[in-house]
Amino acid sequence: MDVKAIKELIRFIEKTSLTEFEYESETERIYVNRASLTSDASGQTYTQQPVQQAPKPEPISEKPVEKKEDKLEGVEVKAPIVGTFYEAPSPGAEPFVKEGDVVKKGQTLCIIEAMKIMNEIEAEYDCRILKVLGVNGEPVEYGETIFLVEPR
């Protein structure tokens, strides 16, 4: 959140009867507290500690995680929209592609459902599927890597 947005948030909160406001996302945390208000000579009220912003702490893992995964060299195919990833045209059907498959440009790789619309995601070029990273039935974010491919 940029400084301008934080200032607008403070002005908005000052116009309400709220004494405390907290917002938290994956990347930031904002906490506003009006508990200690002070007035200056002109009578204008302001907060002494209006905003604190800190990164969200990383979850503590009980087991040390080693990032010793197989390093697959390839081109990332990213989700072009937010939605639900489906590897097959219907439940119980064979997946569109599997790891190791060679696909042609325009061939369907998967479906991403967004707002009840099934969007077929097609290969942009001839390639071989190195890794399927999307999980069937799970949500994907815009720009999330769903396949690793090797162009042909």
Image: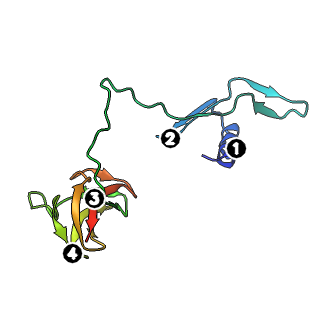
Q: CA distance from mark 2 to mark 3?
A: 25 Å
Element on which disc 3 rests: strand
| Marks 2 and 4 in Cβ contact (< 8 Å) | no
Numbered badge on residue 147: 3
Instruction: Identify the residue position indicated by label 1 in the image.
Output: 7
Position of residue 107 relative to residue 17, above or below, is: below
Mark nearer the viewer, 2 or 4: 4
Residue 2 x, y percent position in the rendering: 64, 47
Give the residue type that dot 4 points to. Lys
Give the residue type that dot 2 points to. Thr
Disc on the earlier residue, 3 or 4: 4
Give the residue type that dot 3 points to. Phe
Point 25% across, 73% down: residue: 126
Q: CA distance from mark 2 to mark 1?
A: 19 Å
Q: CA distance from mark 4 to mark 1?
A: 52 Å
| Badge 2: residue crowd in 10 Å (few <14, some 14–19, many ≥20) | few
Residue 85 x, y percent position in the rendering: 26, 57
Position of residue 56 relative to residue 90, above or below, is: above
Disc on the earlier residue, 2 or 1: 1
| Badge 3: residue crowd in 10 Å (few <14, some 14–19, many ≥20) | many
| Marks 4 and 1 in Cβ contact (< 8 Å) | no
Q: Is residue 92 left or right of residue 53?
A: left
Q: Is residue 38 left or right of residue 53?
A: right
Residue 95 x, y percent position in the rendering: 14, 61
Q: Does residue 6 appear in the picture of this structure?
A: yes
Instruction: Identify the residue position indicated by label 2 in the image.
Output: 27
Q: CA distance from mark 3 to mark 1?
A: 41 Å
Instruction: Identify the residue position indicated by label 4 in the image.
Output: 104
